[in-house]
Amino acid sequence: MAQVLTSADIDQTILLEKPVAVLGYGSQGRAQALNLRDSGVDVRVGLRDGAPSAERARDDGMRVVDVPTAVAEATLVAMLIPDTAAPAVFREWVAPDLARGDAVLFAHGFNVHYSTVDIPATVDVIMVAPKAPGHAVRTTFADGHGVPCLTAVSQDFTGQATELANAYADAIGGGRAGILATTFAEETETDLFGEQSVLVGGVTGLIRTAFEVLVDAGYQPESAYFECAHELKLVVDLIYEHGLAGMYRFISDTAEFGDYHTANRPVWSQVRAHFTGLLQEIQDGRFARTWIAEDESGRAMFLAARKAAAGHPIEEVGERLRGLTR
Ligand code: NDP
Ligand code: MG
Ligand code: MG
């Protein structure tokens, strides 16, 4: 079994001695900058000129500077901007101001693993990947808890890269929930696979398909929404607390039997083959190349799909029903 570290195993001193630049003040940037500050770290936020997010950072009491200034002042640079923006920002605004022995940190392995950034050999390259959206990284920390973090090192110029990654993970709250060492390859491939197979691609596909089957069969869209979307959270909360097998204790025997009754249908071998294909596209770089090309050519497919998703009939009924309980 892999070793999972907690705060008791970690010394934050190495981080407390380092000026840190957090580039980006979005989902992860805001959460991590605030948590670092509350942990006593010297943080400045680096943003581009006229950044819409600068006002929020200033309202939070952060010192905001331009990206080159942030990089020049800091000895640890956290790249908390969108993965598609990182290569150009790194090339133009980060690399020129990096000093020997500095550290560059990523919250996801994509750009290092798929070699879209050309990082000098004289710096440390580390990853601290919180396994949660940014708002949860912040709210759990403010409540005295944290979210699990994965750490990895792809360049250890100083010999202290692992210690630094652990200290950073602990300072953003990871030590309160568990810190697991991994590699850039493992984090990138499992993260992309998890979001495509289950967390995003799987869940949205299941919900929309099940909703469509019920509505096409003549059931009220409201019933379809409650059964196939609304209740999902309640089941996921049980899984989160008690595991898959533990979840069965809280549902009816009828619901549990329904699971066993349908579990060996041939569709699951098709799903397995589909998931294996997704994993291959992630491992051989096809998914990354497709996404980068889509982004660079103006995201026509991405924007059309987003619009289609927003226009699906489940959105109208869902918005109306969610409004009743607010
Ligand atoms: P966001 O999309 O929330 O980042 C937005 C911030 O980045 C804004 O401050 C924005 O500034 C700035 N930004 C965007 N483009 C540029 C640019 N070209 N130059 C300078 N600044 C720019 O990113 P996330 O927090 O979602 O992702 C950051 C990293 O964290 C990624 O590597 C991601 O994979 C990883 N991650 C994200 C998770 C999440 O929950 N979102 C979960 C775990 C990891 P402006 O105001 O100027 O637009
Ligand atoms: Mg991801
Ligand atoms: Mg039911």
Image (cartoon, rainbow, N blue to C red):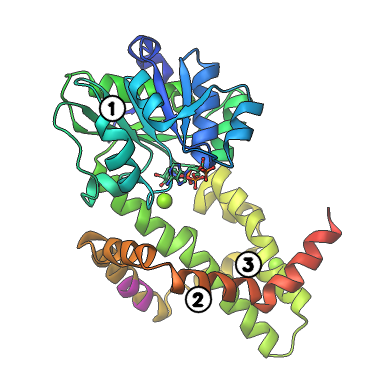
Q: Is residue 227 left or right of residue 293?
A: right
Residue that carries the numbered disc 2 in the rendered image: 262
CA gap between label 1 and label 3 equals 59 Å
Amino acid type for the residue under numbered disc 3? Ala
Q: In the rendered structure, are the residues bearing label 3 and label 2 in contact, judged by CB atoms less than 8 Å apart? A: no
Q: Which residue lies furthest to the bottom in this view?
A: 217
Q: Report, in whole angstroms, how far the alpha carbon at label 2 lies from the one at label 1.
A: 58 Å
Q: Can you tell which quarter of the image residue 292 is in?
A: bottom left
Element under disc 3: helix
The numbered mark at residue 255 is 3
Residue 113: in sight, yes or no?
yes
Name the secondary structure under disc 2: helix
Magenta portion: prevailing SS class: helix
Compute the Cα span from label 3 to label 2. Answer: 11 Å
Query: Which residue matches tag 1?
Result: 97
Residue at the image position 63 percent from the left and 60 percent from the top? 232
Amino acid found under the numbered disc labelled 1: Asp
Among numbered discs 2 and 1, the one appearing first in the sequence: 1
Looking at the rendered image, the disc whose residue lies closer to the viewer, 2 or 1, is: 1
Please report the bounds of the magenta region as a residue range: 270-274
Residue occupying the point 45% across, 61% down: 198
Residue 213 in picture, x, y percent from top left: 62, 84
Q: Name the foreground residue: 55 vs 276.
A: 55
Crowd tier of the residue under label 1, counting other residues whose Cα lies within 10 Å: few below 14, some 14–19, many 20 or above: some
- Would the CB of label 3 be found within 8 Å of ligand 3? yes
Disc marking residue 111: none
